């Protein structure tokens, strides 16, 4: 009697469930006290920035004498250098900073992630060229790089976004390259590449999903640095232009009268500090949650092979260890 052998088939690793994993990491981060405090501070400042203009009154109307004290005719927080309401200008002055910082962060993550992952996956001369370019950019202080571009080309919103994003992309590239090198050396990635799958597909479907945790941490961290940079540019007069309300501009305009009415400086400074601290704490909570979860749920471990189709042997093969 001839013995029959059941055919076995190997199946490519399934696509990582990025949305589910992101929700799990975020849920774990929010459950910690760092995550709750960081997210609370961030959401509070975001609410002030985007809901404030709906209730803040006119930020350009002259309400009283310059640097008039709080509680007078200029409103709850007094007047600024021209007698405008500090409260109204504070409520109107944050949305632009947040939008510009968010756009710069997206640009930094996109450029840095592409450069870092391609460098790690391709290796060789491509890796050397990309990383030497990154080293050159890292040698230039971020603020100096941004101010150089703005002073040469001019103060434009798109240029601020470009300058801040490109100045932070090298740090993202460094982090993502280190993480992608480990993923690129795993057997299932090499197996997929050996099947003739184009490199862009391998990177998109099998490398990038395993980098979700460092991407989330870097996004929150870069956002906090972008907020500081954008507000610093406005303080130096190369961002938003007066009389438009802006937290960085407010600090610069009212610093000369801080003794008469400190709220012109303190109100925007407190909100900027709370936003930077909140985003930093939340990024730290995400990083700790990712480390605490360990390798559980790592999409790079989701490598399975299908068992034989023999009905007498219905048990699947076990997960292949690394």
Image: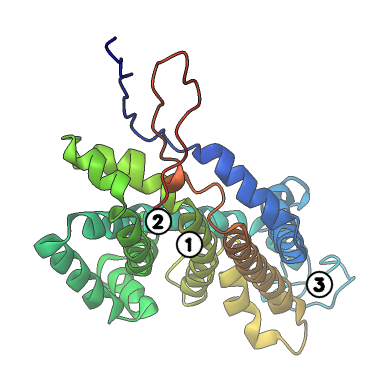
Residue hosting label 3: 78
Q: Are marks 3 and 1 in contact (CB under 8 Å)?
A: no
The image shows residue 79 at horizontal and vertical percentages of 76, 72
Circle 1 packing at 10 Å, graded few (<14), some (14-19), many (20+), is: many
User: What residue is shown at x 52% (from left), y 61% (from top)?
Assistant: 217
Circle 2 packing at 10 Å, graded few (<14), some (14-19), many (20+), is: many
Q: Quadrant of residue 68?
A: bottom right
Tag on residue 109? 2
The image shows residue 32 at horizontal and vertical percentages of 75, 61
* Residue at the farthest bottom position: 259
Q: Secondary structure at mark 1?
A: helix
Q: Quadrant of residue 82?
A: bottom right
Residue hosting label 1: 218
Q: Nearer the viewer, residue 234 or 224?
A: 224
Compute the Cα span from label 3 to label 1.
39 Å
Q: Left or right: 268 with respect to 117?
A: right
In the image, residue 275 sits, relative to residue 213, either above or below, namely below
The image shows residue 10 at horizontal and vertical percentages of 32, 29
Report whether residue 196 is seen: yes
Picture mark count: 3
Q: Are marks 2 and 1 in contact (CB under 8 Å)?
A: yes
Q: Quadrant of residue 283?
A: bottom right
* Residue at the farthest top position: 1
In the picture, the quarter occupied by the N terminus is top left
User: What residue is shown at x 28% (from left), y 70% (from top)?
Assistant: 149
In the image, residue 154 sits, relative to residue 135, either above or below, namely above
User: What residue is shown at x 18% (from left), y 55% (from top)?
Assistant: 122
Q: Left or right: 267 with respect to 25?
A: right
């Amino acid at each position: 009697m001839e013995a029959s052998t059941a055919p076995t088939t190997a199946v490519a690793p399934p696509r990582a469930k990025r949305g589910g994993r992101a929700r799990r990491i975020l849920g774990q981060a929010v459950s910690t006290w760092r995550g709750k405090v960081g997210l609370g501070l961030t959401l509070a400042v975001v609410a002030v920035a985007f809901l404030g203009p709906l209730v803040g009154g006119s930020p350009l109307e002259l309400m009283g004498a310059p640097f008039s004290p709080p509680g007078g005719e200029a409103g709850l927080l007094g007047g600024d250098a021209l007698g405008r309401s500090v409260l109204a200008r504070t409520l109107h002055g944050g949305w632009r900073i947040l939008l510009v910082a968010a756009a710069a962060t997206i640009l930094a993550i996109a450029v840095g992630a592409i450069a870092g992952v391609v460098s790690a996956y391709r290796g060789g001369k491509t890796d050397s060229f990309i990383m030497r370019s990154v080293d050159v950019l890292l040698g230039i202080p971020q603020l100096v790089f941004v101010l150089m571009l703005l002073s040469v080309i001019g103060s434009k919103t798109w240029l601020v976004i470009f300058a801040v994003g490109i100045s932070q992309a090298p740090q993202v590239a460094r982090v993502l390259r280190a993480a992608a090198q480990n993923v690129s050396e795993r057997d299932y990635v090499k197996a997929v590449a050996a099947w003739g799958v184009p490199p862009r597909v391998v990177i998109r479907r099998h490398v990038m999903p395993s980098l979700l945790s460092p991407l989330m941490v870097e996004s929150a961290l870069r956002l906090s640095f972008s907020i500081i940079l954008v507000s610093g540019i406005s303080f130096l007069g190369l961002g938003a232009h007066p009389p438009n309300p802006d937290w960085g501009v407010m600090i610069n305009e009212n610093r000369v009268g801080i003794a008469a009415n400190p709220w012109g400086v303190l109100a925007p400074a407190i909100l900027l500090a709370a936003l930077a601290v909140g985003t930093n704490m939340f990024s730290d909570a995400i990083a700790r949650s990712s480390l605490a979860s360990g390798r559980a749920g790592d999409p790079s471990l989701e490598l399975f092979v299908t068992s034989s189709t023999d009905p007498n042997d219905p048990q699947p093969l076990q997960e292949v260890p690394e």
